[in-house]
Image: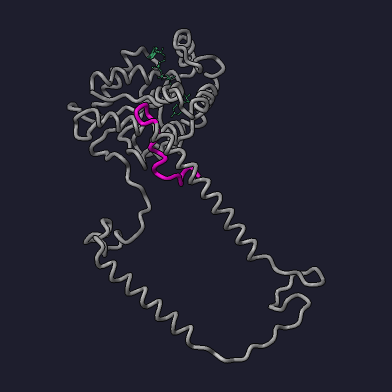
């Protein structure tokens, strides 16, 4: 059902868009319920259609005779034309009324002068992203837990003027927001190193992007480092479809042993519920099984820039800058 949720469902919460969050997810679930009840009604109608009366032997009777009964009395073959004439007259009248009313209506904005072309006439099969990649640069920053994504993003922000959006941070903020109906759900997912349903995360990201763009007077232009997202194929596809296609994927590659050491060290002070041995093990597993396919997917599109993040942060950053320069040029 997720893929057929209304677009509105993706306009979810940020701290400034709380009520739209709730309303959007409610709308989504209301739609699901409507779908379910429509399905039930359809099924009910179908089963009615397929209920045939049983005859005396207990078998279904498929003739137009009532089971075991005699044929209905034959009607005399007199045809009365007047009802037909009345129906035709009424239908023609209604049609003419409709045509005359339409003449007074303003033209439909979607059927402009080019409406005669096949493209304009065909129903839209894909949605348009909320932000154009011409105005908005999105770079996905991926890598295992503790690979150093956040550390590198902080440096890129000060040198390139990116806005850094960490999906994990946004989820933690939503989790702690008083009154959030997703607080407990997010908490459980994070503790288990699992991926929160994409509707929540995509909406948080889209809202944060929108808030950033409207707060900065840059005519809707902006640069975003989306850190720790997408971590699952459905997120990747949906985000690019409804929010904005990414220009590049910065992938920080680091051995598990090194990442574990960093996370356990960070866990001494981070206060994060998932910086402990058990959660780290689960996060690694999710990363290998669920998130690596996303990296492979973008790799096939030639979008991945892989940086070894085993060395110290300075060295990793130097390499990152060099790789960005190669892709975007000196003036980026
Ligand atoms: N290149 C590095 N060498 C050594 N330690 C590092 C390096 N980069 C980051 N760290 C440290 O490792 C820990 C994890 O780094 P960071 O938070 O940047 O990783 P992350 O990939 O964003 O993690 P997560 O996915 O869990 O949010 C931090 O304590 C950070 O200071
Ligand atoms: O797209 C996402 C990103 C993150 N999560 C959950 O958050 C935690 C922590 O993420 P960090 O990037 O390490 O801060 C992650 O383990 C997931 O449980 C998510 O569900 N979806």
Q: Residue 328: where, in percent of width, then height?
A: 23, 30
Residue found at the far left of this picture: 331
Quarter holding the C terminus is top left
Residue drawn 78% across the image and 69% down it: 59
The residue drawn where x is 33% and y is 17% is 316
Is 10 part of what is drawn in magenta?
Answer: yes
Q: Is residue 40 above or below residue 84?
A: above
Q: Is residue 249 above or below residue 62?
A: above
Camera sees residue 170:
yes
Range drawn in magenta:
1-18
Residue nearer the viewer, 213 or 160: 213
294 over 162 or under it: above or below: below
Q: Position of residue 20 (x, y in %)?
A: 39, 35
Residue 154, horizontal then vertical, whole percent: 31, 18
Residue 251 in sight here: no
Figure quadrant of residue 94: bottom left
Q: Residue at x 48, y 83 (%)?
A: 83
Q: Residue furthest right?
A: 57
Quarter containing ligand 1?
A: top left
Q: In the rendered structure, does residue 42 fall within the stretch colored magenta?
A: no
**Dominant SS type (magenta):** helix
Looking at the image, is 248 positioned above or below residue 241?
A: above
Instruction: Report how many numbered discs are placed on residues in the image.
Output: 0
The colour scheme used to paint the residues is one colour
Q: Quadrant of residue 215?
A: top left
The residue that appears at 28% across and 25% down in the rendered structure is 163
**Which of the two residues, 38 or 291, is positioned nearer the viewer here?**
38
Image location of residue 114, percent across then percent down? 23, 61
């Amino acid at each position: 059902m997720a893929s057929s949720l209304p677009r509105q469902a993706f306009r979810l919460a940020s701290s400034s868009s709380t009520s739209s969050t709730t309303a959007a997810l409610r709308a989504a679930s209301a739609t699901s319920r409507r779908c379910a009840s429509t399905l039930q009604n359809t099924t009910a109608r179908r089963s009615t259609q397929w209920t045939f009366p049983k005859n005396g032997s207990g078998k279904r009777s498929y003739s137009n005779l009532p089971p075991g009964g005699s044929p209905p009395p034959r009607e005399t073959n007199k045809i009365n034309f007047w009802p037909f004439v009345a129906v035709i007259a009424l239908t023609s009248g209604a049609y003419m009324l409709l045509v005359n009313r339409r003449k007074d209506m303003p033209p439909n904005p979607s059927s402009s002068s080019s409406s005669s072309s096949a493209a304009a006439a065909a129903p839209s099969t894909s949605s348009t992203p909320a932000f154009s990649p011409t105005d908005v640069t999105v770079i996905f920053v991926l890598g295992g837990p503790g690979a150093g994504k956040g550390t590198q993003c902080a440096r890129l922000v000060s040198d390139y003027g990116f806005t850094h959006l960490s999906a994990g941070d946004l989820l933690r903020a939503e989790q702690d927001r008083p009154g959030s109906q997703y607080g407990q759900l997010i908490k459980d997912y994070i503790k288990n190193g699992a991926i929160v349903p994409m509707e929540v995360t995509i909406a948080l990201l889209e809202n944060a992007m929108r808030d950033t763009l409207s707060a900065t007077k840059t005519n809707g232009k902006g640069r975003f480092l989306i850190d720790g997202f997408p971590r699952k194929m459905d997120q990747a596809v949906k985000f690019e479809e409804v929010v904005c296609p990414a220009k590049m994927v910065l992938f920080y590659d680091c051995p598990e042993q090194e990442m574990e050491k960093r996370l356990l060290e960070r866990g001494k002070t981070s206060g994060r519920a998932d910086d402990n041995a058990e959660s780290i093990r689960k996060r690694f597993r999710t990363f290998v099984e669920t998130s690596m396919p996303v990296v492979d997917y973008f790799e096939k599109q030639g979008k991945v820039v892989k940086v070894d993040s085993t060395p110290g942060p300075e060295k990793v950053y130097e390499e990152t800058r060099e790789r960005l320069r190669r892709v975007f040029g000196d003036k980026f």
